[in-house]
């Protein structure tokens, strides 16, 4: 922690201005502290999170201190530009060449790991959000081991309530995919080393450091319990400990033929004949940099040389014999603390004697060769489905509609409302009634496929758009009595004649009175008395006068309590709907409605001419807007309505007629604002003569 500055940034190294060639105790040159870098700061944040998590059971105060330092490092990353700038590599100052540059042109990988570890330790959603964003920026190579799985493992092992289960599942799949890749590579390697098969990439522990590939296999074994991964992990370490053509053990102090001359100043100058034990060496290398000795001579000593044409590597000296145990051959013998740590981690998990199996969860169901990213709800373990963020469900679109019933019925109400599969059939029918209650009105209104409508709960049936009603097949098996009873008058008015026939096979709907211009039964015509048609029906109900494939004619009745009991029901609304015989689409939907009183616009302006003195109104769009003035109206492409006032015997206002003084209740002869007429005008049928 002493390498962290007060602003949270971390200095990336402390070393002499040039390479040391003496024991550490004999170094006299001043130590130089090098710049704060984004990579170093990000790695510090990740390591601090791990350290804090591991020591908390034993020293909570220290754990808090270290975690605070890690979070401060993360804050530094958010408030400072990347250094070196993203896409560039670090180079040593000319006057302070001190050590290797270990150049890397991107810090995103390190930041990703830092975010993952901080989230695992704290559960702070800020770090999870950063992890999600950095996934789109960092280049991840699942074949690179073991560092490639670090950040995935941190996410997999996070069990906070706010964990993004899709991110976590993607991480599981990435680990399993990386392990599968290693098994495939081990299968084609003569010594079961799960490295990339390209021979020229052999070097710097690529072959000899086979131990470093084990963690990804052990992680896969932990998750799945599949012994194949554990077996491969144990076999992968053999190359490092002598199972190779040279019988060479690439760890000092182990085996009958260990490395004896590693690139290690302490081992060279401490006066002890054998090197410090436990140091891994890079081992086999296909080609040494040919810019200086002894590299040039070593390359030439391997005969035939490594010059290859047409990938005929069998004509050159075998790569698994290209090793020289010499301090001066750096690529063969420069072990670092990084590799030593990877060896220690893998071997401690497997057990020092090779007989202690690693801890296993084994609950994860994985099929080798599966996709390594989540693209469908069924890619997530069933018990985690309720934790999926609804945004993912929206993004997956129609694929969710293909999910089996057990997945759909695991959804929460919010998740159900997020399903965006309007044209995928049957999925609503695979839901139980409790799950269906999560469907929201806007979602239902967007449905396209008829099977989604017929599977709705009765309480949701009124949400079906009128224009979608004709798309439902006219078969009685598609309807239930409860479903039919929930239809609105407007919806019934939108039905085709075939659908109405199908409904006749079941109990008729029992809809409450409303203002929908559909139909709710058949009118009972009492007779033609004088000049007034009289009907019996429910107040406010719509009745079907004519229903065919091409036209629907419905009327609405209204009771006027000021009229005698046997003559108080009048027509207050009429609707005419016509349909295209080719696709059952609606061509026109005309609604004529009345109001008991004159609308304010007509009452307040004496010069304004209104239909029925402002009590008659026409809608050309099924009730969305109304016209209250006479005129010649054209709408759609071929439709026309002419509206004007008529008087006398052709009048349609019930209160245009004077009620006889002999009425039993003594009502006023004329309503306010009405026009006096005689009771002895011509009857309507006489006007037709």
Image: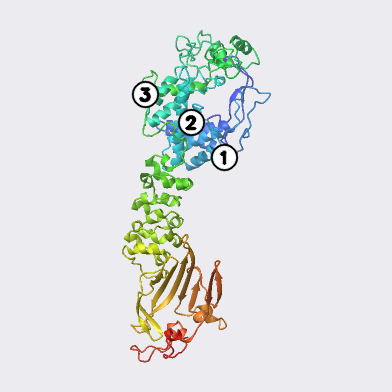
| Residue 187 horizontal side relative to residue 606, left or right | left
Query: Which of the two labelled residues, at mark 3 and mark 2, occupies the earlier sequence position?
Result: 2
The image shows residue 425, relative to residue 20, as above or below, that is: below
In three-dimensional space, the C-alpha distance between marks 3 and 2, rounded to whole angstroms, equals 21 Å
In three-dimensional space, the C-alpha distance between marks 3 and 1, rounded to whole angstroms, equals 42 Å
Relative image position of residue 91 (x, y in whole percent): 64, 27
Q: Can residue 490 be seen in this view?
A: yes
Q: Badge 1 is on which residue?
A: 78
Please report the residue visible at 56 percent of the width from the left and 29 percent of the height from the top.
Answer: 3
Please report the residue visible at 49 percent of the width from the left and 75 percent of the height from the top.
Answer: 617
Q: Please, which residue is most extreme toward the front here? A: 689
Question: Which element type, helix, strand or loop, lies under badge 1?
Answer: helix
In three-dimensional space, the C-alpha distance between marks 1 and 2, rounded to whole angstroms, equals 22 Å
Relative image position of residue 184 (x, y in whole percent): 46, 25
Please report the residue visible at 36 percent of the width from the left and 46 percent of the height from the top.
Answer: 405
In front of the other: 176 or 358:
176
> Pointers 3 and 2 in contact (CB under 8 A)?
no
Q: Badge 3 is on which residue?
A: 357
Task: Quadrant for residue 404, please give it.
Answer: top left
In front of the other: 544 or 157:
544
Q: Badge 2 is on which residue?
A: 150
């Amino acid at each position: 922690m002493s390498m962290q500055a007060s602003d949270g940034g971390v200095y990336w190294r402390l070393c002499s201005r040039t390479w040391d060639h003496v024991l550490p105790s004999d170094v006299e040159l001043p130590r130089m502290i090098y710049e704060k870098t984004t990579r170093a700061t990000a790695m510090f944040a990740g390591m601090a999170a791990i350290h804090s998590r591991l020591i908390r059971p034993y020293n909570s105060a220290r754990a808090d201190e270290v975690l605070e330092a890690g979070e401060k490092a993360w804050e530094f990353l958010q408030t400072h530009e990347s250094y070196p700038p993203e896409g560039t590599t670090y180079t040593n100052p000319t006057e302070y060449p001190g050590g290797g540059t270990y150049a890397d042109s991107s810090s995103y990988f390190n930041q990703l790991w830092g975010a993952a570890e901080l989230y695992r330790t704290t559960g702070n959603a800020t770090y999870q959000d950063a992890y999600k964003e950095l996934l789109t920026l960092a280049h991840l190579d699942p074949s690179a081991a073991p560092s490639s799985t670090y950040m995935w493992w941190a996410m997999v092992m996070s069990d906070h309530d706010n964990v993004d289960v899709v991110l976590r599942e993607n991480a599981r799949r990435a680990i399993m995919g990386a392990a599968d890749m290693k098994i495939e590579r081990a299968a084609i390697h003569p010594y079961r080393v799960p490295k990339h098969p390209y021979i020229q990439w052999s070097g710097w522990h690529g072959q000899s450091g086979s131990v470093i590939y084990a963690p990804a296999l052990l992680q896969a074994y932990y998750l799945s319990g599949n012994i194949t991964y554990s077996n491969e992990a144990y076999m992968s370490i053999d190359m490092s400990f002598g199972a190779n053509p040279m019988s060479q053990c690439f760890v000092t102090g182990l085996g009958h033929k260990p490395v004896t001359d590693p690139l290690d100043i302490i081992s060279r100058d401490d006066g002890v004949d054998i090197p410090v034990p436990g140091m891994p060496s890079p081992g086999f290398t296909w080609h040494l940099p040919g810019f200086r000795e002894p590299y040039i001579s070593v390359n030439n000593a391997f005969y035939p040389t490594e010059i290859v044409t047409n990938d005929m590597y069998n004509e050159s000296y075998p790569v698994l014999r290209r090793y020289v145990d010499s301090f001066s051959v750096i690529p063969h013998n420069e072990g670092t603390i990084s590799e030593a740590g990877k060896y220690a981690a893998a071997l401690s998990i497997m057990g020092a004697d090779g007989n202690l199996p690693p801890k296993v969860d084994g609950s994860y169901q994985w099929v080798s060769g599966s996709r390594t990213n989540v693209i469908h709800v069924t890619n997530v373990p069933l018990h985690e489905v309720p934790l999926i963020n609804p945004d993912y469900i929206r993004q997956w679109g129609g694929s969710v509609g293909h999910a089996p019933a057990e997945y759909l019925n695991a959804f929460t109400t919010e998740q159900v409302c997020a399903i965006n599969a309007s044209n995928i059939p049957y999925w609503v029918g695979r839901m139980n009634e409790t799950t269906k209650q999560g469907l929201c009105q806007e979602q239902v209104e967007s449905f396209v496929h008829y099977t989604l409508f017929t599977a709705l709960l009765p309480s949701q049936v009124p949400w079906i758009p009128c224009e979608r009603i004709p798309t439902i097949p006219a078969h009685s098996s598609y309807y239930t009595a409860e479903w039919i009873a929930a239809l609105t008058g407007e919806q019934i008015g939108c039905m085709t004649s075939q659908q109405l026939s199908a409904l006749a096979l079941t109990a008729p709907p029992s809809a409450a009175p409303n203002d929908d211009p559909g139909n709710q039964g058949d009118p009972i015509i009492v007779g033609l008395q004088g000049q007034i048609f009289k009907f019996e029906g429910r107040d406010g109900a719509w009745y079907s006068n004519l229903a065919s494939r091409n036209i629907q004619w419905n009327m609405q009745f209204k009771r006027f309590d000021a009229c005698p009991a046997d003559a108080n029901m009048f027509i207050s609304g009429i609707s005419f709907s016509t349909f295209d015989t080719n696709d059952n689409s609606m061509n026109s939907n005309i609604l004529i409605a009345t109001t008991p009183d004159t609308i304010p616009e007509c009452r307040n302006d004496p010069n304004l001419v209104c239909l029925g003195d402002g009590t008659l109104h026409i809608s050309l769009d099924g009730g969305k807007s109304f016209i209250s003035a006479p005129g010649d109206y054209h709408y759609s492409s071929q439709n026309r309505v002419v509206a004007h006032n008529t008087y006398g015997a052709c009048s349609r206002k019930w209160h245009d007629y004077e009620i006889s003084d002999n009425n039993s209740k003594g009502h006023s002869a004329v309503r306010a604002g009405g026009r006096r007429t005689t009771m002895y005008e011509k009857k309507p049928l006489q006007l037709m003569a």
